[in-house]
Amino acid sequence: MLHRLYGGTSFGTEEDVAFLSRRGSKGIAVARTHTYKKLEKNVALRIQSGVILAANAVASFFVWLFRLLDSKMTVMIVPHSGKKSINFQTNIFALSLGSIIVVGICISFFYFNNKSIGETAEINRLMTEHRETLASLDELRDENVHLLKTARHFQASLSQSLSLLGIERSRPTAGVSSNASDLAALFDMQDTVSGSIRESAGVRELTNYLDGAVQPIEQLGKMLENQSNLFKEIPSIWPTSNMNAHFSMPFGPAIHPITGQWYIHRGLDFSTYRSGDPVVATADGQVVSIGYDPSFGNNIVLRHKHGIYTRYAHLSTMRVSRGQIVQQRDVIGYIGNTGVTTGPHLHYEVHIGSDVVDPAQYINIKFSN
């Protein structure tokens, strides 16, 4: 319902409508503004009343709580022995605060106790790892000593090999100890250096030595690569591919197995206890002779460079022909028992010009006495 004050008189709804109809749109706007202001005033009054009531309720609660906590209590301790009892007064606030402190102390005790147990277990684990590390360090020191001993042998062997090949090793210059390539500094270390410092110094010196040894070893590899053709041109491998063959008779003076007389054995006898094992060319060459001989049986003669010839005798069969070019390790025939023999074997000879030489000098074989 709309209300409007006009000339001190209050009009009802029908009168207001009639009045507003007479006053027009301007009167309607004024009436609405007046109504909105009145509503705002009522809302503000209600909010203010609510805030006051809430403040009074909070204040009443804290007053009640203060009175409750300030309530007096008497604690009496009566001994069973009949002695005088002990009385003391307190309030609920002090009793609650004391209970909270006691509970906090108990919780802290259990927390730090569990934490202490965990830290103790961690310390034990670290101590175990420390003992294992010490054991590993001792093992590493033993391996380091073994490494240094092996390095000594390596140094001697490398120096000897380089000397035989005519390769000079550069010596460390004065004042450049960090790049030294000799083990002298390593092997002559003072005994006053001990522990991990000495081992570390040894490893550093060994590393420097190996770094310095790389260049001569590379030179050795290049030399071997450049000389690979030479090794293929000289009879430097076994004449049989069966490495289980044994030497039934060496080069030199021997008793003939058939006549029983002393004679000069002009080659090496390879035996595999059977016929048919492959016989290979010991160097690149050309077949210059192939055929049968009453003494050598089926035999092949190869001509190589540098005036070298090789003979392969007592073969069962031959796989090459006269004038054929063969490469090192090519199969040229098979071990047999042809000619004058006591069993299947290969008789192998090396000739240089008109001289017969010991084949063992080329295939690096040493015979036991």
Image (cartoon, helix red, strand yellow):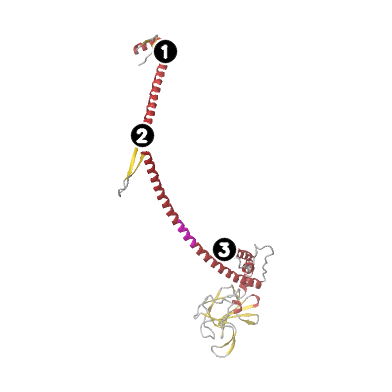
Q: For the residues marked 1 and 2, what is the alpha-carbon distance in whole angstroms?
A: 61 Å
In space, the residues marked 1 and 3 are separated at their CA atoms by 107 Å
The residue sitting at the right extreme is 174
Question: Dot 2: what SS?
Answer: helix
Q: Mark 1 vs mark 3: which is more N-terminal?
A: 1
In space, the residues marked 3 and 2 are separated at their CA atoms by: 76 Å
Q: For the residue carrying disc 1, how many other residues have a C-alpha within 10 Å: few (<14), some (14-19), or many (20+)? A: some
Residue shown at 58% from the left, 70% from the top: 149
**Disc number for residue 336:** none
Q: Residues within 10 Å of mark 3 (few under 14, many from 20)?
A: few
Neighbor class of circle 2 (other Cα within 10 Å; few <14, some 14-19, many 20+) is few
**Highlighted range, magenta:** 122-131
Residue 350 visible at all = yes
Question: Quick one: 86 or 336, which is closer to the camera?
Answer: 86
Q: Tell me the number on the disc at residue 67.
A: 2
The correct choice, above or below, for 138 with respect to 286 in the image is above
Q: Image point 39% across, 22% down: which residue?
A: 45
What residue did someone put label 3 on? 196
Query: Residue 114, how many percent across, how many down?
Result: 41, 52
Can residue 289 be seen in this snapshot? Answer: no
In the picture provided, is 91 more to the left or to the right than 220? left
Q: Quadrant of residue 329?
A: bottom right
Q: Amino acid at mark 3?
A: Ser
Query: 300 or 77, which lies in front?
Result: 77
Mark linked to residue 27 = 1
* Mark 3 residue element: helix
Marks 1 and 3: which is nearer the front? 3
